[in-house]
Image (tube, coloured by chain):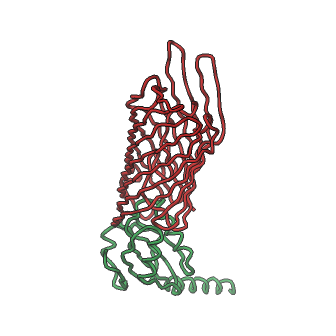
Chain colours: A green, B red
Amino acid sequence: MKILSSIVAAVVFTGAALADDIQYDIRVDGITCPFCVATSERALRKIEGIHAVGSDLETGTIFVCADSRVSFTDDQLKQLFLDKGFTYRSFTKASGCSIAGQEYGDEELKDIPENHSHHSDSKS
Amino acid sequence: MLVQCFWVSASYAAPIATNTALPLSTDEVIIRQQFVLTRSSDRISGTVRGVDRFESRTVLGYGVTSKLAVFGVLPIVDVSSEFGSINASEFGLGDAALFARYEVFRSDQAGRTIRISPYAGVRMPTGRDGKTGDGSVDIFGGLIATIASTQWVLDSQLRYDFNREAEGFQRGDSTIIETSFQYRLSPGKVTQETNAFVFGVLELSASHSDRNRLGGVSDPNSGGFQLFLTPGLQYSTRRWIADFGVKVPIINDLNGSALEPDYSVMASIRVNF
């Protein structure tokens, strides 16, 4: 019975942690191949609080799953991708993460859920 | 001279035999190990004359900033030559090179980029004079333009090699124009799960070399014009890129009885850190 309670508690806790996660969809221009995006993904993974990083090269989007300790700003991301040799454009933020196992096309990116907030710096 | 077979253009952090203007990140280290085997042969009065040159090039690249990258190239050379029943071979360090590349133009869009970068460097006489190196400190430079998308990449470069004299020998200066087209063969569609690309590669390289000079006298059996075609394949992942190509001469218009190349087989792997 004690074991069952522990499992239930763990499941409830895990569910709560996932629900608190935040997904950032970061638009970056100039990335054209898996080899090119690797250093940017590695730099993001090193940030404490980031659990997962993925990318869609076709749309130039890097997906980041992070907890509430992480809070990006446009200036911070602009500098990060400048150092990587690419051009940062904007990011959206949404509660909950859905990075793994999903295919992101243009239509899905245009259809941003209501709970997304949007940040951008104007295109140069 | 044994090293006087033919110059496969140095490919540093590049497609197969060409150069690229795609960036290295700040503090990114890239290591490329390239192997090149070149066979040159002909017949003089029924006697076979041939040179097999195997070169192992280790290339180290470092991103000083996202615009400025520096590269070092260290070749190890094994040259075997034959003239009828006479054979000779040389093995050792070749002439090392150092060069820097600076991005002067960039235009980025989603999944696309255009970059233009000049570069300049020096080749040092680290090889054995007249054996695995030519003994001189040579200067080279050029301009690279790259247009890249997730479907295809086009790299072009114009390069000039200003060769200096050492121990009475001066290799002729050379001008090289190269273009590399890489087309993604797989996967058909890029998704979030895509971790690797397979590119089909086709490269065209034209070069003109002046005649060598020995003791101040022009060597009539050196220099000339060459045009090469290099078909190949490239496999690109997030961490490493492997490529393979065969470079064949389309036009060998060399002066006098200069030994003409038959083919080069090239393979390399590069890893980023």
What residue sits 53% from the left and 78% below the top? A50
Q: Nearer the viewer, residue B35 or B222?
A: B222
Furthest residue toward top: B46
- Residue B69 placed where, x, y %? 50, 61
Write the residue at 45% across / 65% down. Answer: B67
Horizontal side, residue A72 vs residue A89: left or right? right
Q: Is residue B206 above or below residue B51?
A: below
* Residue extending furthest toward the right: A2
Up-down: is B227 above or below A31?
above
- Tell me where residue A116 sits by quadrant: bottom left
Residue B261 in view (yes/no): no
User: Picture coordinates of residue A15 (x, y %)?
Assistant: 53, 83
- Whether residue B25 can be seen here: yes
- The number of numbered discs placed on residues in the rendered structure image is 0
Which quadrant holds residue A124? bottom left
Q: Position of residue B34 (x, y in %)?
A: 56, 45
> Percent x, y for residue B191?
40, 62
Closer-to-camera residue (B214/A47): B214
Q: Quadrant of the N terminus of chain B?
A: top right
